[in-house]
Image (cartoon, rainbow, N blue to C red):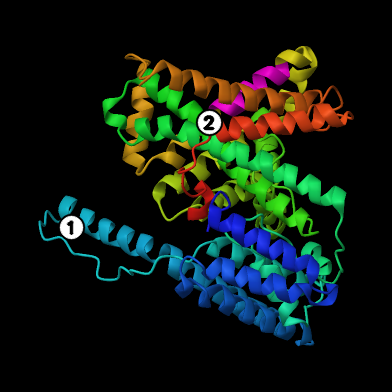
Amino acid sequence: MVFNSIEFVIFFVVTLVLYYLIPGKYRWLWILLASTFFYGYAKPSYLPVPVGIALFAYFAGIQIERAGYEKKTRQYFIISVAAIIGLLVFFKYTNFFTESTTGFVNFVKAKIFHSGNSISNNLLINIAAPLGISYITFQAIGYLIEIKRGSHPAEKHFGHFASYLLFFPKIIAGPVERAHHFLPQLKEPHPFNYELFTAGAKQVLWGLFKKIVIADRIAIYVNAVFNNHEHHSGITLIVASIFYVFQIYADFSGYTDMALGFAKMLGFDLMPNFNRPLLAKSVTEFWRKWHMSLSTWFGEYFYTPIAIEKREWGNLGVIYASFVTFTVLGFWHGANWTFIVFGALQGFILSIEIFTRRERKDMRKRIPKWLNDGGGILFTFGYFTLSSIFFRADTVTDAMQIIKKILSFSGPLYTESTSIILFLLLAVFYLTAYEFKEEFFEKKFSLSNNRYWLVRNSYYCVLIVILLETAVFDGGEFIYFQF
């Protein structure tokens, strides 16, 4: 059940109406029931996994808090986190590890021992990873880390904890919500708030617009090119790669806008996930603005402990922590070498930025700000576009072939039809202009938040008309559902 479907609209309207009719102290139960139905709607067999994680993390948190002394606390914590990670690895990475091992053994047999007898992988599992398992496990692990650190008490109400972990707007693709931010909200009555409700509805509309008008429309061209990349020219692959960055941004940030908007309509506040990353002036800044809930999760619970442990290494310790963190972050996105390369490329450029921090600071003093900012934005966008080829390609070999063609700058541009290219350019221009205005002229003239009722609501009426006339209503799931 995706946000841009009729089924979800019906589900959400029923959930919303009954939510505000139920007395405040019982609303957590309705949220839990609705979230359970939402998750199990497509495939009920998925449901035992998140419910099992919720039960395990709930009791593990209580045991960690009650352990009494540091050694026992640490033991409970390590066993609990290892069990949750083990479950994630089983569902998401078993096939990757067994296939990689089998491929390596066959390579050694063929190249070193000159044997033509290859072995087959008999350990493949035919169980699809439950939707959103990465987000569920990361939130459970973060919750246990906070208890171990003493920064958050263990939740004693299982219904509240399960509602936090399974809350339907965020369960499939985030944001990676923190327990200390969300759990207290479940204990509040959340009376109907008109301003919050309308703000949420507008955020849902903007997110839906980005998804089905911009992202899904761009996807038609991008998929046509990348799915047949061997038949397309270097110029076409350059254009498709640039469009792909806008597609994945509009798709994922559109999902986040909708998730945050639906939560607001129910009276909840979720973590923001994007802050105009395509206008970042460095890769470091980019990752502070892109998928912020996940980036900060890795920063708090992964990068910082490594950096502290290696602090005697100085800058090398920071670089080591950054490279390891982003390689793992890349692998988190999927069980494929393409994602590992994508993450490693981010770690590599971040290491360069750390090494050249002083030189770049001195350079900024000698270059006009507009030129420095513009150059930083172009470089960051260009680097992310290039590395995203690995994110989009099916294999590393495919990605290298695409890059090789791109570097040739050869061939004609595949257009299919002039109207399609024109529409794509208009979609990208509108999204870029909107982001540019919000980034650099936030307090200047605004249509969406105009103080005049007629202007403000006319703007949203126009958005609705454009959405109904140009949207792709069969665009399918959001890209990040697969992670």
Q: Give residue 255's position: percent from left, percent from top.
A: 61, 47
* Residue type of the residue flagged with mark 1: Lys
Circle 2 packing at 10 Å, graded few (<14), some (14-19), many (20+), is some
Residue that carries the numbered disc 2 in the rendered image: 470
Q: Give residue 388's position: percent from left, percent from top.
A: 49, 36
Residue that carries the numbered disc 1 in the rendered image: 109
Q: In this picture, which residue range is highlighted in magenta?
A: 372-382
Q: Tell me: residue 109, above or below residue 199.
A: below
Q: Tell me the tag on residue 372.
A: none
* Residue type of the residue flagged with mark 2: Thr
For the residues carrying marks 2 and 1, which lies nearer the camera in this image? 2
Secondary structure, mark 2, is helix
| 98 drawn magenta | no
Q: Tell me: residue 139, above or below residue 261.
A: below
Q: Is residue 306 visible?
A: yes
SS assignment for the magenta stretch, majority: helix
Measured in 3D between alpha carbons, the distance from the residue under mark 2 to the one under mark 1, in whole angstroms, is 55 Å
Residue 68 versus residue 42: which sits nearer the camera?
42
Drawn side of residue 112 relative to residue 258, left or right: left
Q: Give residue 141's position: percent from left, percent from top.
A: 65, 68
Which of disc 1 and disc 2 is earlier in sequence? 1
| Residue 75 position by quadrant | bottom right
Residue located 67% across and 65% down the image = 167
